[in-house]
Amino acid sequence: MLEIFTVIYEYFIFFYATSLIISYIVLAIFSFLAINRYKNYNTDIDDEELLKSDLAPGISVIAPAYNEEKTIIVNVKSLLTLEYPIFEVIIVNDGSKDKTLDLLIEEFELVEVPFAYVEKVKTKPYKRTFKSTNPKYDILTVVDKENGGTKADAFNAGLNASVFPYYLNTDVDCILARNTLTKMIKPILSSKERVIAVGATLRMSNNCDIEEGLIKRVRPPKALIPRFQELEYIRSYLLGKMGWELINSVPNVSGGLGMFDKEIAIKAGGYGADSHAEDMDMMTRMCVHMMNNRLKYRVGYIPLSCCWTEGPPNLQILNRQRTRWASGLFQMFYDHRAVLFNPKYKNLGMVTFPYVFIYEFLAPIIEAFGILFTIFLFLFGLINWTFAPLILFYSYAFAVMVSSIVIIWDQMTFKYYKTTQEVLTLFVTALLEPFMYHPLIMFFSLKGYYSYITSRELAWGTMTRQGFDKKEGDKKNDNNKPNDSGKKENRPNIFQKNKKDESGGKFEPIKT
Amino acid sequence: MSFVEWFLTFVYKIKTFPLIIQITIVLTLLFLIVTICTLITIYIIRRKYNREQRKLQENAPKIRELFEDVLFTDKNYSAEEIFNRFEEIVGEVNEETLDFGLDVLVEIKNDGEEESDKYDQIIDALGLIEHLEEKFGSRSNSKIIDAFQQAFVLELSKFDAQILQYAYSRNKKLRNEARNSYLALSANDPYRFFNEIEGTLTKWDEIELMQYLELQNERGNLEGLGKWINYSKNNSLVIFLVKMVGHFKQRGIDDILIEKLEDEDAQVRAVSIDTIGQLNLNQVEQTLIERYYTEPEICQVAIIRTIEKFNTGKALDFLKQAFEESNNTDTKKIIAEAILNYSYEGRMAFQNLKNTLNGFDLTILQHVETPLIKYK
């Protein structure tokens, strides 16, 4: 019996690993083609043309803030320095309990104004809107609302207050490149099909030089965890999403930086207010809306890094972040289970969703089972010591190869690092990642799934900011305990959800 | 044991392994080789980049200084002097250094801080036309696109032959770029491809075409756009051209615009209404008012904006009625703004509405009249 199981398991792992390797190779080729296509037909002169044009469409930059007193001022200033002919910046204060709102009012000379706020997408109660009396900040709008427990609810409020046909969603802890809007609107403007969303690459701001909310010098993070995350981000964006872009199957536009078509976002019902993976949830809703209405669409991606965000400085914060993401992924697949393997949803239902489900959602479970099974084989003396190290080295060599290819792709697009040594630092990180970082991510993902199933409390805004003012921030926060002030949310567990479904709450693809 | 012997023993040993292990060994070696190759490539890319950056950092400010001296001072440089000074800075004048120079010149032109009519002096002295011609002949699409844009920024119009070879290219993007650019870069027949625009214009096409038309306008070569509006069956082109008629305030096609009010496409009607407003053709005010309630929202908004622009003083009752009857908050804001900007009578009517309305309608009025709200 054990032998049969072992043989079946070995075959399963063989096909799983082989298909994963093939998919990575295919994605690497796709991303190479997509990056080259982008580089061939986009230049910096395009930015100049757009900046001078009366035909540039307006963009609303929406950033929700929850207990962000440490970085809010620098980050809002950064958003205000974006270069684009016509845009507004909307900060949504999601019922912060710290001084976030007070600091905004003081720094930007805000006063409450009568604002015709229309709830096109339902949110927790809206309270008021502030505008600046200083003409320097006339494009800034601050919306104050009751805490909704999720970033999604805050984004929805920003969506309601926005006036322009496109919006950029970002986080207030993100520093954006000044040309973010010109770069990200370009795929929308130059496509004959309707582009409903555009994403770009995010990187870590830890150890970058930032002055007045602007990135002056990019460096890979010195601390190991953010450096691992930097490599992980570059791999995910440049290899994964750029590859998917070529066949119009981008699964997700990051919540940290994404440009969206407002009309479609609203028609798709806005962000799922209880979602903790609001970005992928929103993307799925929009794609489902387009397909339900038989409308052609594209999701674009650009290979440029336009956004720098603070990476988790320690394990505790990484744990919180990844647990939340994993839980959100579980929730997303649960909410949109009707899309999975559904030919009605074309690439989304038959390619993207299954890929993410099999190779991202199931991967931690399969890996954890593999580790347990290896321990079992070890205890019973069943490991083939002649070949086991070879197989392990095979996987390791592949992981390192993929990361090194990604580093080349990154160097092909734009050379963000000044020195060769900084680039090689990333390569060293790639050598360490499979042993040091990957097992942690697997563990936190499983924890997130467990949290979702057992309805453990989750929080948004629990990422402790170190701030960008190095002199003050770094010393103060290096030993910071994680912030426990995040708004907790009690959600029904998966079994309660099933009961709700039976009583009529069954998922139905959104139709408008 | 020599390496060869060891290797042969190793290969022999591998042959005794199961097939799957043999494949694994081969793939592992392949992964290692690819990783080493990528490392070497990274090193080469970086070395080249660092060298270029060093050169750029050393030379770019000096080149900029030289060009600004030629362009913005009274000094008279001969072509030879410019060439020699440039050569002194860059060491050797070749494709790479000319590209540096071209980039700097384009940057200065794009900054547009000062006007100068001496760009041609630098272009001729360094042979930038020939350099651009070579770029047009390149096999790299990015270089060709670069050449299109640099030629446009420098307002050069001697590339008919080079562009024409791409105007019928099988590469759609290149073909499109060539046809758009022809409008700016052709000396003979810039409007040649207006009749051959394929499919729907993208918003980027519109942005490019508009700036090329602006260039033609500056050169005094802007043709009347009415003939294409009248005959083109491409609605996206008609929409764009009607917008441009408003932008350039072209007169003489009033009848065509009024005729477009009957077009089947709501977008064509909406953009025609907007242009009628920009051209102040207020004789159609009553027609627009009569059409208001039968039109879709996009045209209704255009009608309100146009009536606001006409500002004849005769449509206040209509605006008030439209405000009362509209159920769309965004449209209501636009109507309220139109009433507020509708001369003295409009402001009075706006105050009266404020006194009589309450609830969300009142908030809309307060929203519209709050100057701190820049984008209503």
Image: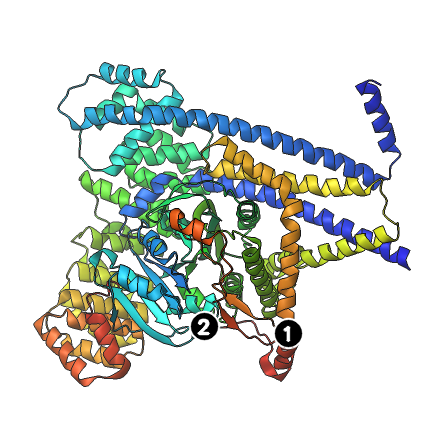
Q: Nearer the viewer, residue A2 or B91?
A: A2
Q: Is residue A499 above or below residue B199?
A: below
Would residue B102 appear left or right of B115 to someone viewing this image?
right
Q: Give coordinates of residue B139: x percent, y percent.
A: 47, 29
Residue at mark 1: chain: A
Q: Give coordinates of residue B219: x percent, y percent.
A: 19, 38
Pick the quarter of the image with the N terminus of chain A. bottom right
Q: How many marks?
A: 2
Disc number for residue A148 = 2
Q: Nearer the viewer, residue A476 or A214?
A: A476
Q: Is residue A510 above or below residue A432?
A: below
Q: Give coordinates of residue A500: x percent, y percent.
A: 61, 81
First in sequence: mark 2 or mark 1?
2
Residue at 20 percent of width and 24 percent of height: B70
Residue at 31 percent of width and 75 percent of height: B328
Q: Give coordinates of residue A201: x percent, y percent.
A: 48, 48
Q: Is residue A118 something one can see in this rendering? A: no
Would residue A65 appear left or right of A456 to someone viewing this image?
left
Residue type of the residue flagged with mark 1? Ile
Q: Nearer the viewer, residue B312 or A269?
A: A269
Residue type of the residue flagged with mark 2? Gly
Q: Which residue is mark 1?
A: A494
Mark 1: few/some/many CA within 10 Å (<14, 14-19, 20+): some
